[in-house]
Image (cartoon, grey):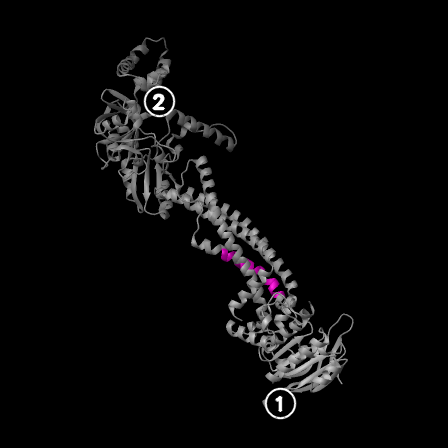
Amino acid sequence: MRAADVLRLAFAALYQQKVRTSLTTLGVAVGTLVLFLSLSIGIGVREAVLYQIRRHDDLRKVEIRSGSGKVEEHIPPGEVEVKGEMSDAKRKRLHDRLVNRWINKNGYPATTPLAVERLQEIREWPHVESVTPLYINFGRATLGEKGEDVQTVSATVAEKLLRGRLVAGAWFAAEDERSVVVSEYLLYLWGMASDEEVRGALGRKMRLEYHTGANKPLMLMSLFGLDASMADPEQERVLQKVVQRLPEVMKKLDLTPKEMEALRRTLQGPTLPKMRQQPDHLISAELMIAGVLRGPEKGDPQGGSMVERFRPDADLILPVGTAQSLFLQNPYHAERGVEAATVLVDDEAHVKEVANRVEAIGLGQYSLVEFAERLQTNVMLLTLAMSFIAFVALLVAALGITNTLVMSVLERTHEIGVMKAVGARDRHVLLLFLVEGMLVGLLGSGLGLLCGWLASFPGDAVARSLMERQSDVHVDQSLFAFPLWLTLGVPLFATLVTTLAALYPARRAAKVNPIEALRHE
Amino acid sequence: MSRADSDVIVRAADLSRTFAAASAPVHALRGVSLEVRRGEKVALLGRSGSGKSSLLNILGGLDRPTSGSVHVAGLDLTRLTAVQLAHYRSTIVGMIFQSFHLIAARTALQNVELPMVFNGRKPRDRRDAARQALEAVGLSERMRHRPGELSGGERQRVAIARALVNHPEILLADEPTGNLDTATAAEIFDILEENCRRGGVTLLLVTHDEELARRRVDRVLRMQDGRLS
């Protein structure tokens, strides 16, 4: 028997029962549609997320922070010892409180500072491509007569996210350039609002000053509920003078020697021991304004790295080399190192290894690899759940096929008898019914695929708008993915299921006894 | 059976066929022996339930005997596999029935084509052969009609065309005129006779029309209670 004849006969049989065939086909189409869409969106979302993260190499980054290690190793043992008889649990609770109190009093011990040498050491590790420290500092930026307190951050020449927000001028060309990129906000504070004025700022020289140590005069202002940034130079000078005279004034206060000692300790300032000992001197640099940055907007591409999230509001961006040289002039900074740095690993597969090593030397680390893994697992679980439902739908449709074909075998018993009487083999009859099941599967899944593809356009728009409304994330590509294996695999699978569903009726048909069947009219 | 014996096309010896039934087994055939020569026209007469159809079903390869031997055209039917038996049905033997057994949803042409579909003939060959067979039974004008649109006589003619389209060696006809009026029956018998003569086809005819049988066939066999008398 020829394949074309099998198809022709199977088609003819299906065509004879148009309504029944349509309904069965529709069932398969719905099952396929749901299966196809759930897999498609599962893959699509996963790809979109990964693409989003990968775009800025975020999956290859490990953020490192100066570690705190085991705090207790840095506390003299006697200070947090719990005395007296009690349960171990209670001893532990009290111990934890004592440790907390010690930290409140003495500050958090930086056990593993991210000093320059350590960054250099990490650069030498295998799989590490680069280590970029982030220098965040607070200083005063002065253009002409106008000074403003600013947060400064460092950025590399290769920096992409911030560079994307340049509205005038250019990004730095070298890491040690003596230039800055300033925010449009800072220019506004300096009195430059119009586009023309903004362009006029380019190429001008500004002065950046950092105080080492605490600025005690300005701190004093907070006593009176004033914002230190409001102080003008005159006020600052006066306050400076007051602070210098404070020890003399103290003597005139009516205090016992013990009280006097306590007050002196208080005035010595907060718990940063090094800072306290440091003379307040000024680090200053003259920098050229190279470019102007606008503030962040909704829909800006976002980096997943936390370090990068520090930056959007920065008023002054320094090339990383310049930032480092200024930063390290402060001995306190030189010793304590930077807050954070980004380690770029050569391959996603090695991120975990590097992250573990970072932890092993007592630094804090954060990478998106785990997050991405977790996200993928979640998406996969969701996809699995949806696919399961779709699978059930397909199974129901398959049962529909079985039912339809069983009915069909009963109705066509006579026909089967005739076919056998004129020479059809059992196998021919079996094949005919199997092919009927297969055809329903092919038609239904084809239809389901087409509908799924059509539905993905409005579906994508809806999902995207929901996502953007809720999470601010802008996705460029479709949330539905149609890889070839899916587009071919789903209908193949559906067809396989429907063909299997036809197996039982087909066997029954093949076993029909022709003599009895011919009596059956 | 040897080829030298080619003069005999059907040789059955001591055939019996028993059907298992709930109350007691039914003995449809009880030791039937017969020989039919090639080209012979034989009528099988008997009342209903005498075992005529059972014998025909065995000779047609639709059923197997419970015991005994049966050779048709040199083939030992008891030894053929199911697949070989299907091939036998589509090539060596043609069958027609009282109630025609056409497929209602298919046209006359498609019905006649059907036996050739299962032995893999090319569609064009098939169509030509079916046309010729339908022309031979005088139905060239009604090829595209479905059985429901044809008269009883026309339907039986389609069935005859279908039975003969593969050029069988023997035609088994089970009361082919039983559902037809006398005039049409005579007409159908003419067609049967003519076609068998032309193709050298042996005819084994089951009927209870004694008159028809006596006038038209070479030999009449009578069957009663599963035995030939």
| Subunit of label 1 | B
Q: Is mark 2 on a helix, strand or loop?
A: loop
Q: Residues within 10 Å of mark 2 (few under 14, many from 20)?
A: some
Task: Looking at the picture, tell me which residue is in the foreground, A42 or A424.
Answer: A424
| Subunit of label 2 | A
Farthest residue to the right: give it.
B23
- Quarter the N terminus of chain A occupies: bottom right
Residues at marks 1 and 2 touching, judged by CB atoms closer than 8 Å: no
Which residue was labeled with disc 1? B7
Q: Looking at the picture, does residue B67 appear above or below residue A214?
A: below
**Residue A232 appears anywhere in the view:** yes
Residue at left 67%, top 82%? B204
Residue A91, image x, y percentages: 49, 30
Which residue was labeled with disc 2? A270
Q: Looking at the picture, does residue A471 appear above or below residue B188?
A: above
Task: Looking at the picture, tell me which residue is in the foreground, A79 or B145.
Answer: B145
Amino acid identity at mark 2: Pro
Residue B180, image x, y percentages: 71, 74
Amino acid identity at mark 1: Asp
Q: Residues within 10 Å of mark 1 (few under 14, many from 20)?
A: few
Residue at left 49%, top 52%? A449
**Taken as a whole, is the magenta stretch helix, strand or loop?**
helix
User: What is the magenta range?
Assistant: A491-508
